[in-house]
Image: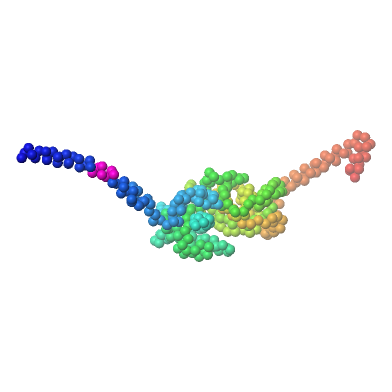
Amino acid sequence: SLKSSLPQNAAMGRARCLAPLAMALGMAFVMPLCFSWMPQGAQGPQGQGQGQKSPRSKVSRQIQANDASDFHAMDPNYLVKEFSAMTKTAFRRRMALRKPLPERLALFFPAIEGREGQSQDARLMNFNMAGQSVEVALPMEGSNGSGILKLIEKHASLWRVHSSEVPQVPPGTLVQLYDATPNMQAPQSAETLGAVKSSLLQRSSATAGGMAWNGMAGFSPSSCPRDFDGVHVAYTVWDCRGASGTCNMLSEGEDEGALVCEFGAMKRGLSTMIPGESRRFWISSEVKDRRFGRPPPERALPFGDVVVDLTLLGIEREAVFEYKLSDEAIKLGEMRDKTPAVVAQRALGVGIQLWTWALVYSYYQQPQDMDIIGFSQSVHL
């Protein structure tokens, strides 16, 4: 019996040895067939969920694809690249560190379903720490007033309008917030125009037009303001102090009767703008000319480091010849005319004119012959 059982045990041993090999070969042939019949997006643990739709909405996916950190790429009309996106976490961090919240925000409405992206400046009114909401004041179209928008964060760097007092922004609109508060340190992209640095904030849809004669300043684009023109501008003045150069809003408003020639250090930059453009000017404390659109003492910029946001709304040609000075400006001009420096300057001018005429007169009073004598007498008469 022992001899008869040896072949059977050997066969069973060979079967146990070949079983793992057979299973491996079976898996190698069967598994590809199984996966080939599985739906796309469920092939193995690594491919799981690749074919499924993201739980984010279509708008969120579009904004994430546009790289929300690059504001310049999303809105070509708003040209400042140094702005940082504001999220709920960013607001809470600033409040925890007792840092000032941004007073000026740039609202960007992304391009959705064929609608072009738009940007607009707004002012931060309140951040509700408990409700995690933000209230901003947005100018209303066709009026000088502003309405309040209540925003609730939907995703990171993406907010949804919860309630609106502005007709052109209904509830449910998606918007992104960017800190547009300036700093006294001008960015590297700023250009030097005259005595100050300047950077274009927002481009206008209008064109500069052809070249036109600008009097003593030569030729300039026809759509730009000239030295003797009046302008309608909206402005915001920022006071910048401290080692960090943090700026706080000092004043804002509009002026429909400002004069280009009375903008002092900003006149060079203003002369390059066209209606609809916004430009930011960094004016250091070293700049002495503080005129700001009106003859002194009607208006002037404060002393110290300031930043001015200027938006050109309209142009009135040759308005300087119809401008009426205020009583204070007339009185100040009369006082300046009586100062010793002005009196001495005028006396020097009159003296130079008299000295020139005396030289000409003495030259013709020394004739060398009768023809010259007759000519000099006729000239003298």
In magenta segment, residue 345: no
Quadrant of the rendered image containing residue 145: bottom right
In magenta segment, residue 26: yes
Q: Residue at x 74, y 47 (%)?
A: 346
Secondary structure mostly taken by the magenta-highlighted segment of the chain: helix
Task: Pick out the residue farthest to the front.
Answer: 4
Task: Pick out the residue farthest to the top.
Answer: 368
Quarter of the image with the N terminus is top left
Task: Pick out the residue farthest to the left.
Answer: 1
Q: Can residue 230 be seen in this view?
A: yes
Q: Give the range drawn in magenta.
A: 23-29
Nearest the eye: 96 or 149: 149
Q: Is residue 121 visible?
A: no
Q: Residue at x 71, y 47 (%)?
A: 216
Q: Position of residue 227 (x, y in %)?
A: 68, 51
Nearest the eye: 41 or 283: 41
Q: Residue at x 49, y 57 (%)?
A: 112
Quadrant of the rendered image containing residue 331: bottom right
Please indicate whether residue 40 sits to the left or right of residue 296 in the image.
Answer: left
Q: Position of residue 179 (x, y in %)?
A: 48, 53
